[in-house]
Amino acid sequence: MSQETTNNLERENKKWYQKLPHPYILLFLIVILSTMLTYIIPAGQFEREEVDGRTVVVAGTFEYIEQTPVGPFDMFKAIPEGLVGAADVIFIVFIAGAMFHTLQSTGAIENGVGVLVKKVKSDKGISDTKIIWLLTFIFGLLGAVVGFENNIALIPIGVILGLAMGFDLMTGAGMTIAGIGLGFATSPINVYTVGVSHGIAELPVFSGFWLRSAFMLACMAVLAHHISKYAAKVKADPEKSLVKGIDTSDMKLSKSVEEYELTGTHKAVLMVLLGIILVIVWGTLQHAWYIAEISTVFLVGTIIAGLIARYSADEILNTMLKGAADLTKGALIIGVAMGISIVLSQGNIQDTIAYNLATPLENFPPLISGMLMALVHGVINFFLPSGSGQAMATMPIMVPISDLVGITRQTAVLAFQIGDGIMNLMIPTLGGLLAMLALARIPFEKWFKFVFPLMVKVVLVGWVFTAIAVFINWGPA
């Protein structure tokens, strides 16, 4: 059999998600498709008003307007505009890369992970499954309390720790990226999604805490089981690893765990890292810090760590530049993804899509409406991946619909959490996800294959909780 015939057979035997093009190509094709849609989908818009400093949609005000299709030049222009619009996310990737390369260069992270692994492996009662469940729930809790992009600094640590424990790159990424993402998506105290949605739905902020907490814990258990099952399969047969062939040589421990110990410098650098995390948690919870402030903390912490390691100014700078350069491909893809939203916004079809997807829900019984509401949010999320942005655009539509079809507003907010937050883990238009995948060196197509079956499981769990909410007529308490 010729090599060409073999290659053709291999291509034919691939599943559909294995045939996805390179993420840059995929995103550019979506930019082209979005541009075409501005000629096909009628332009429309809602009236908006300022409420407590936020711009929200006024329910019942949708109207079609004059068509505003995006031309070929503006289509290409949307990409550099996307780079500008996503500058904060792009630069936090560069700065996070610079910080971790600097911290790693001191030997503190490798030795810290090595010492931790040595202690864990000395305890014969801790199995791989227990380790995965423990770490998944820890990262999930951080996502629930601290946020999504706010935890970007933890991704390399989690991946390195996973590799040191003998898992593959995807297992480490699953525990960290999926753990943080799912914790953030299902958090009962998520300011950006639950908080904004409760404000729009005129419900007490963070009400319905216990049912949402149960939902979060159930989702985290499904995630931990999914990762454990994958890790066991890869340990039994390394050829089944989804990330086979990806170079992780500079992310692995370079010696046996028995050789690792922490020097005074290592301990001081790790204290700087702990300080960075604590300052970010404090700033996020007390002062609503976001990407710019977090990037500032990263930058200051990097300089302090370099000085502790007795680096010269030139050494600190060169180490930071090397770390930032390694993440260029992953950082710039975020701007391309942002170009999609710019095209849809310029074509004035985002509101039209939201309106026409949401309105038909009035024709279904309560339980089906609640389930479909989650799916509608999932579809809209592809075009409008911002949690708070989507809440402000769609909840003013969904809240009146929930009143009409007979489901409570709490249930409508739960449907939003399912469709917006959970789906965020598998769409290529979310800058934060792409940033984390870049730090973990996971290609999007590999991540999609890992996370797609997980998302099916979690959505089914979400529907079970939706049914419970409808059955108990879940109120504002």
Image (spheres, grey):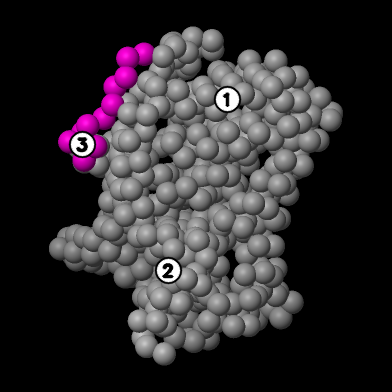
Q: Nearer the viewer, mark 1 or mark 2?
A: 1
Q: Name which of mark 3 and mark 1 comes first in the sequence.
A: 3
**Would you say residue 108 sits in the magenta stretch?**
no
Dot 1 falls on a residue whose secondary structure is: helix
Residue at 44% x, 86% y: name it.
255
The residue wearing badge 1 is 358
First in residue order: circle 1 vs circle 2: 2
Check whether the beta carbons of the residues at disc 1 and disc 2 lie within 8 A of each other. Answer: no
The structure residue drawn at horizontal position 35% and vertical position 37%, both measured from the top left corner, is 34
Residue 226 picture location, percent across and down: 66, 62
Q: Which residue is drawn at the image coordinates 63% and 15% (left, top)?
A: 400
Q: Quadrant of the C terminus?
A: top right
Q: Is residue 218 above or below residue 445?
A: above
Quadrant of residue 413 within the rendered picture: top right
- Figure quadrant of residue 271: bottom left
The residue labelled by disc 2 is 109
Q: Residues within 10 Å of mark 1 (few under 14, many from 20)?
A: many
Residue 128: % across, % down: 66, 74
Neighbour class for label 3 at 10 Å: few (<14), some, many (≥20)?
few
Can residue 87 be seen here?
no
Distance CA(mark 3)–CA(mark 1): 30 Å
Query: From this viewpoint, is residue 349 visible?
Result: yes
Instruction: Give how far across and how far down residue 247 sits, in percent.
Output: 37, 76
The residue to which callout 3 is attached is 72
Indicate left or right for 419 with 283 as reference. right
Q: Nearer the viewer, residue 267 or 122?
A: 122
Q: Secondary structure at mark 2?
A: helix
Magenta segment: 65-76
Q: Could you tell whether 438 is left or right of 354 in the image? A: left
Identity, as a three-letter code, of the amino acid under mark 1: Ala
